[in-house]
């Protein structure tokens, strides 16, 4: 009996030790066993996984990691990365936007609406979130709320009316009503100088609307370099190098009276008609 009891205790200790060792091992994510070596997208996922492990507190890396996982067909893992990015950076508006896209494609419209609304709270001027939110409102029959979101999105980025720029524009029946809401503001906007318009208009003009957005895509086009001013030499400082053996250049003497009469500029043709001949230059008396 004592031998059996000792054997049972030994086996119990071994089982408990194995269970504890399993707890100590890091749990592998769901997607790990499905990645194929050599596949371009899977290799990007592996590389991004290493970046996240090296810098786990980066919301930017986690947002982009979620995009890759969503593209590969792992919505659960992508959702976790988006939510972690949202916790790490309360100002990050792309992670909730991409989460909204994920929930919308999964048919979870209520969760998508909550994600888009969170994105708008973090960045009220992000037109893509507003347009997607308006489309979901319209599908629920909340037309007034949808028109408000469409109008704000179009006010921020007028190019979203174009289906080539925004494929979602072809799915709504309320775009004309949203344009009427913005009519007076559009007229006023046309008179504003470019520097007084919405500050993020150029930044978001090229952001895709029909797929997840990576962090570097939200930065907008790079600023054009400012051309350096070309100094204009003064007449006194300018010099002219003459060919060897040529006499030095001498300016012509001014006419009597000290004034130089400039030659009149040729007149420009008007509406395609030939220009009138230039007026004769008066001869000094």
Image (spheres, rainbow, N blue to C red):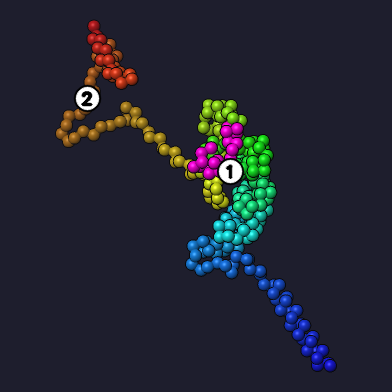
Mark-to-mark CA distance, 2 and 1: 69 Å
Which residue in the structure is indicated by mark 2?
Answer: 250
Q: Residue at x 74, y 81 (%)?
A: 15
Q: Residue at x 68, y 50 (%)?
A: 111
Q: Is residue 255 left or right of residue 99?
A: left
Classify 58 as above or below 151. below
* Residue 98: x %, y % from top left: 60, 51
Residue 144 vs residue 192, the one in the foreground: 144
Classify 231 as above or below 131. above
- The residue at the far top in this view is 285
Q: Which mark is residue 51?
A: none
Q: Any magenta on residue 164? A: yes
Q: Is residue 69 left or right of residue 23?
A: left
Classify 10 as above or below 220. below
Which label lies toward us, 2 or 1? Answer: 1
* Residue 46: x %, y % from top left: 55, 64
Is disc 2 placed on a helix, strand or loop?
A: loop
Q: Is residue 203 visible?
A: no
Which residue in the structure is indicated by mark 1?
Answer: 128
- The residue at the far left in this view is 245
* Residue 284: x %, y % from top left: 24, 9
Classify 188 as above or below 175. above
Which comes sooner in the sequence, label 2 or label 1? Answer: 1
Q: Could you classify mark 2 by the number of other residues whose Cα lies within 10 Å: few (under 14), some (14-19), or many (20 or more)?
A: few
Is disc 1 placed on a helix, strand or loop?
A: helix
């Amino acid at each position: 009996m004592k031998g059996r009891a000792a054997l049972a205790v030994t086996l119990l200790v071994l089982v408990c030790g194995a269970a504890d060792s399993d707890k100590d091992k890091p749990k592998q994510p769901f997607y790990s066993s499905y990645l194929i070596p050599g596949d371009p997208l899977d290799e990007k996922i592996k590389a991004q996984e290493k970046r996240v492990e090296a810098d786990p507190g980066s919301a930017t890396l986690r947002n982009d990691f979620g995009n890759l996982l969503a593209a590969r067909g792992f919505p659960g893992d992508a959702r976790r990365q988006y939510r972690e990015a949202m916790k790490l950076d309360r100002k990050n508006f792309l992670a909730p936007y991409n989460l909204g896209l994920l929930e919308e494609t999964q048919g979870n419209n209520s969760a998508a609406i909550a994600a888009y609304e969170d994105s708008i709270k973090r960045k009220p001027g992000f037109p893509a979130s507003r347009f997607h939110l308006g489309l979901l409102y319209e599908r629920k029959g909340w037309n007034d709320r949808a028109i408000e979101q469409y109008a704000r999105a179009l006010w921020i980025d007028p190019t979203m009316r174009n289906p080539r720029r925004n494929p979602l524009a072809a799915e709504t029946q309320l775009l004309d009503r949203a344009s009427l809401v913005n009519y007076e503001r559009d007229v006023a906007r046309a008179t504003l100088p470019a520097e007084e318009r919405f500050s993020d208009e150029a930044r978001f003009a090229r952001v895709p609307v029909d797929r997840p957005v990576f962090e570097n895509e939200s930065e907008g086009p790079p600023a054009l370099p400012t051309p350096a001013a070309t100094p204009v030499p003064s007449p006194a400082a300018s010099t002219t190098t003459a060919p060897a053996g040529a006499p030095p250049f001498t300016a012509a003497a001014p006419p009597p009276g000290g004034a130089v009469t400039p030659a009149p500029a040729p007149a420009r043709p008007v509406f395609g008609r030939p220009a009138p001949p230039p007026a004769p230059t008066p001869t000094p008396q």
